[in-house]
């Protein structure tokens, strides 16, 4: 045990020593025995529950201080307690992704000599939103405060809020147009922003002068400081009660217990072996205003993952073979990758026992240098890193789920999370003032299916397990747009025996403004960025944006004529086109166009989840229910699910079971007729590969992956039986 | 120690257990005897006698078939040695045109077939789709799962792997 209260060592020495002990013993901080747990398990467990209660209570209190609907309504906040070396002991609910990123932030300050300059003193407030130090993206601003007891640093209190406005090149928090760090917005790089429990006035002035909507950021800062002080005082009271020696020891035993619990859980729920999967992401910016000619305008990302579970229960995730980082905002740092791992583990494996940094210590991430997971330039932008992070951890969920299925825990099998496309905006508000914000109703996508039931409709995102779309009225209060409709998107869940959860689409009328910039991000173009499982199909996640400029909606409303409230189910001609006159726009990829004004109409849809199992095993009664309630179209019910529907006396759909059986039998025969042996297909494909008969984006994807990863190149050549020299030429796009 | 009857496990696997009961199973401590109960339920479900060693998909199992360990479909079709990728012995239907993609996604925006295709891996006997890949054209077929079967039985289950006749 290193961290004795009498230890005269500097924090930096203590951190190095703690890491050495972990290396040497394989146990956190060299704790080979959980002696306090053995001595009094009830006291041990009760204390951890108490710490967790401090975090939850501090978070709830802080949410009432915040002005941001992201924090107040959607709960975009997390609070945690750390050891002096920066390892999480306990955390609140909320955006748990940041628990380990904050850990990196604290360790970064320790390693960089903050004890000497700027000094770490009681009452100091440190803030950070630099992903290369320790966060995910620029809007994730974290504050930490040291906890002192009788002059000795005994821990840290930390809090993160996701800011709705970061002052970047495009408005909002997820700064879609940022192509380098320098356009991402206001950076606070592990900076001392307050002393004596008070934020510095000059820091607040900097925020006020560099943000489009400073009220969100500034009040969130106050909310975070309040929660940190609240936690600090609670921990100090607890130390008075249990004694300093006990605190220093138990706080570390909690983490070692968390590490052991994670290993045990892996051994309990999964099967050792190698698991593989992949997903893709299409980035299309060709011809869009504002993009600098730094990189190719269009980019296809492959995200392959190999997960290994060893017999001792350790999970290792390897991203070998993925694409290089690029001049866009979707890069991620190791801190962000850690965060994705941590939040996924807490949802799938740490649902009981002690949840803390111990879980993270029982895993390993292999992030090849130079890829988007680990850029070799700290100038890379990371403002929308969720674009690639979410699909990647959706793959992780499917890989884990394969293990759950093999072990028999079918109720834990989950097809995974999907991207949650953001809409950011700025310009002049409906009150005539400057404004900017992210719309956070995206925190309620459809989830992937389970192996025993359908996915959740409009109720899940991976990054915030307490998913919530927020009330329409709250959003309308904060932005110059009013809702024409919020509607389920039919068929948006991937088809399968159990379908993925459906998503929703919002349709807005731009209201009382002559300048509204709308920008979207984190939605894939031209490829699905999710998958199905065990025969289920991916969810359709490459939806385009539809807008109407100078619409005649006011005239229609005045005449009492019907309006369109969503885009409808005809992909070739939307309901907007059928109902409104004006200039209709259909935009693929990030929506970055000229500003909108009053009378314009805009739609933005979110993602559903992937399906599980063979679609022809779908319960016809559930299918009829889906059609009745708008989750599925009749066309899909018959063509995809093979369910023949008739109508009851009230005109409601009911399945014709006999006709359904006949239809499905026909579909099974068609399947076999259309299919070919894989070996035959591979022969044809090999010829195509030798000709490099692919569009430039696909060729470039292969060329980049093979250049960065000799293993990917070797496996590619082996699979297709190509010679050792085979490669693709990547031509520069126009 | 938590434990459930074979009937409960059978209903759970079939998705027929009432939600409140399922929810309780999800929330409580896990049942340590689950694996072998699931194997028992699955063994009764399949129309063949080869001992199931590990389920790897909704209708795919690694089983002891004579002296060999193979990947087998619920219908009885064998995809060969479990260490090799069963997909390579399957039938495949590739949706790489707008028309074929539209069959599965009739009312939504679809991928660009130049960028992505949908691959359905099908059992040649019963036509079940065992797995679907969404991949860029030319992307190698993924070997989803290579279990450490020996390590699993020896180290985690503490039971010997069932052996077939030599």
Image (tube, grey):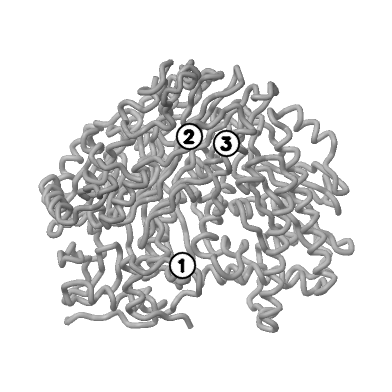
Closest to the observer, A716 or A141: A141
> Is disc 2 in the same subunit as disc 3?
yes
Q: Quadrant of residue A274?
A: bottom left
Residue highlighted by disc 3: A439
Alpha carbon distance from label 1 to label 3: 32 Å
Can the viewer see residue A690 in this picture?
Answer: no
Up-down relation of residue A326 to residue A71 (above or below): above
Position of A72 with respect to A303 (left or right) is right
Q: Secondary structure at mark 3?
A: strand
What crowding class fits label 1: few (fewer than 14 Cα within 10 Å), some (14-19), or many (20 or more)?
A: few
Q: Quadrant of residue B69?
A: bottom left
Q: Residue at x 51, y 44 (%)?
A: A373
Picture coordinates of residue B95 (x, y %)?
Answer: 23, 40
In space, the residues marked 1 and 2 are separated at their CA atoms by 33 Å
Dot 1 and dot 3 within a common chain: no
Q: Are marks 2 and 3 in contact (CB under 8 Å)?
A: no
Which numbered disc, 2 or 3, marks the residue that appears first in the sequence?
3
Pointer 2 residue = A485
Q: Which residue is mark 1?
A: B23
Q: CA distance from mark 2 to mark 3?
A: 15 Å
Mark 1 or 2: the one toward you? 2
Residue at the spot 83% in from the left edge and 64% down from the top edge: A236
Q: Chain of mark 3?
A: A
- Chain letter behind tag 2: A
**Quadrant where the N terminus of chain A lies?**
bottom right
Which label lies toward us, 2 or 3?
2
In the foreground, A484 or A266? A484
Disc number placed over residue A403 in the picture, else none: none
Subunit of label 1:
B
Label 2 Cα neighbours within 10 Å, binned few <14 / some 14-19 / many ≥20: some
Per the image, label 2 sits on a secondary structure element best described as strand
């Amino acid at each position: 045990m290193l961290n004795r209260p009498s230890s005269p060592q500097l924090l930096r020495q203590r951190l190095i020593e703690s890491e050495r002990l972990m290396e040497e013993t394989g146990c956190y901080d060299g704790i080979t025995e959980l002696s306090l747990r053995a001595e009094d398990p009830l006291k041990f467990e009760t204390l951890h529950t108490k710490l967790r209660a401090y975090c939850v209570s501090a978070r709830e209190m802080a949410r009432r201080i915040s002005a941001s609907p992201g924090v107040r309504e959607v709960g975009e906040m997390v609070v945690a307690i750390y050891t002096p070396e920066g390892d999480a002991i306990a955390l609140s609910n909320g955006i748990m992704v940041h628990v380990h990123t904050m850990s990196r932030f604290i360790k970064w300050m320790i390693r960089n000599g903050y004890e000497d300059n700027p000094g770490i003193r009681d009452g100091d407030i440190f803030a950070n939103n630099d992903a290369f130090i320790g966060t995910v993206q620029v809007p994730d601003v974290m504050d930490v405060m040291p906890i002192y007891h009788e002059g000795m640093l005994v821990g840290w209190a930390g809090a993160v809020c996701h800011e709705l406005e970061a002052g970047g090149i495009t408005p909002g928090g997820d700064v879609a147009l940022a192509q380098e760090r320098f356009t991402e917005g206001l950076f606070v790089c592990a900076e001392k922003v307050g002393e004596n429990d008070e934020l510095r006035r000059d820091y607040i002035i900097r925020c006020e002068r560099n943000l489009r909507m400073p009220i969100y950021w500034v009040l969130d800062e106050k909310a975070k400081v309040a929660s940190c002080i609240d936690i600090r005082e609670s921990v100090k009271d607890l130390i008075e009660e249990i004694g300093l020696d006990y605190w220093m020891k138990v706080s570390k035993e909690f983490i070692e217990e968390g590490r052991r619990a994670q290993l045990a859980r892996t051994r309990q729920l999964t099967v050792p072996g190698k698991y593989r999967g992949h997903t893709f992401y299409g980035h299309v910016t060709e011809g869009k205003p504002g993009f600098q000619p730094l990189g190719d305008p269009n980019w296809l990302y492959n995200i392959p993952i190999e997960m290994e579970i060893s017999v001792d229960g350790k999970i290792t995730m390897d991203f070998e073979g993925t694409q290089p980082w690029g001049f866009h905002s979707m890069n991620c740092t190791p801190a962000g990758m850690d965060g994705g791992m941590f939040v996924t583990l807490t949802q799938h494996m740490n649902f009981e026992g002690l949840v803390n940094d111990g879980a993270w210590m029982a895993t390993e991430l292999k992030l090849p240098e130079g890829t988007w997971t680990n850029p070799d330039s700290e100038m890379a932008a990371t403002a929308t890193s969720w674009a690639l992070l979410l699909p990647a951890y959706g793959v992780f969920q499917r890989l884990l789920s394969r293990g759950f299925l093999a072990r028999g825990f079918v109720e834990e099998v989950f097809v995974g999370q999907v991207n949650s496309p953001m809409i950011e905006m700025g310009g002049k508000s409906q009150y005539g003032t400057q404004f900017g914000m992210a719309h956070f109703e995206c925190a309620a996508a459809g989830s992937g299916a389970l192996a025993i039931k359908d996915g959740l409709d409009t109720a899940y995102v991976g990054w915030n397990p307490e998913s919530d779309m927020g009330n329409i009225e709250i959003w309308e209060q904060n932005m110059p747009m009013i809702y024409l409709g919020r509607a389920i998107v039919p068929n948006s869940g991937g088809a399968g025996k159990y379908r993925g959860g459906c998503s929703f689409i919002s349709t807005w009328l731009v209201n009382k403004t002559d300048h509204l910039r709308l920008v979207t991000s984190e939605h894939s173009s031209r490829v699905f960025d999710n998958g199905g499982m065990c025969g289920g199909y991916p969810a359709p996640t490459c939806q385009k944006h539809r807008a109407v400029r100078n619409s005649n909606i006011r005239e229609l409303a005045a005449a009492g004529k019907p309006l369109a409230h969503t885009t409808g189910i005809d992909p070739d001609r939307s309901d907007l086109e059928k109902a409104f006159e004006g200039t209709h726009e259909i935009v693929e990829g990030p929506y970055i166009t000229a500003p909108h004004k009053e009378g314009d109409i805009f739609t933005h849809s979110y993602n559903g989840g992937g399906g599980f199992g063979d679609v022809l095993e779908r319960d016809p009664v559930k299918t009829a229910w889906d059609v009745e309630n708008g989750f599925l179209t009749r066309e899909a019910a018959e063509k995809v699910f093979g369910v023949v529907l008739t109508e009851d006396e009230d005109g409601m759909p009911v399945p014709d079971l006999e006709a359904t059986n006949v239809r499905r039998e026909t579909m099974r025969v068609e399947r076999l007729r259309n299919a070919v042996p894989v070996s035959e297909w591979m022969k044809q494909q090999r010829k195509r590969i030798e000709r490099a008969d692919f569009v430039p984006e696909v060729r470039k994807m292969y060329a980049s992956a093979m250049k960065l990863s000799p293993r990917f190149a070797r496996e590619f050549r082996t699979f297709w039986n190509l010679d050792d020299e085979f490669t693709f030429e990547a031509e520069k796009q126009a | 120690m938590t434990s459930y009857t074979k009937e409960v496990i059978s209903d759970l696997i079939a998705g027929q257990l009432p939600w409140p009961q399922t929810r309780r199973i999800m929330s409580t401590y896990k049942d340590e005897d689950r694996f072998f109960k699931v194997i028992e339920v699955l063994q009764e479900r399949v129309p063949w006698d080869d001992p199931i060693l590990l389920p790897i998909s909704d209708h795919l199992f690694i089983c002891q078939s004579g002296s060999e360990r193979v990947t087998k479909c619920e219908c009885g079709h064998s995809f060969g040695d479990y260490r090799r990728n069963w997909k390579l012995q399957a039938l495949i239907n590739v949706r790489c045109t707008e028309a074929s993609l539209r069959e599965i996604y009739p009312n939504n925006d679809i991928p660009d077939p130049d960028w992505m295709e949908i691959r359905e891996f099908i059992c040649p006997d019963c036509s079940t789709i065992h797995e679907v890949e969404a991949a860029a054209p030319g992307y190698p077929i993924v070997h989803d799962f290579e279990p450490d079967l020996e390590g699993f039985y020896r180290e985690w289950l503490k039971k010997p792997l069932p052996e077939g006749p030599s």
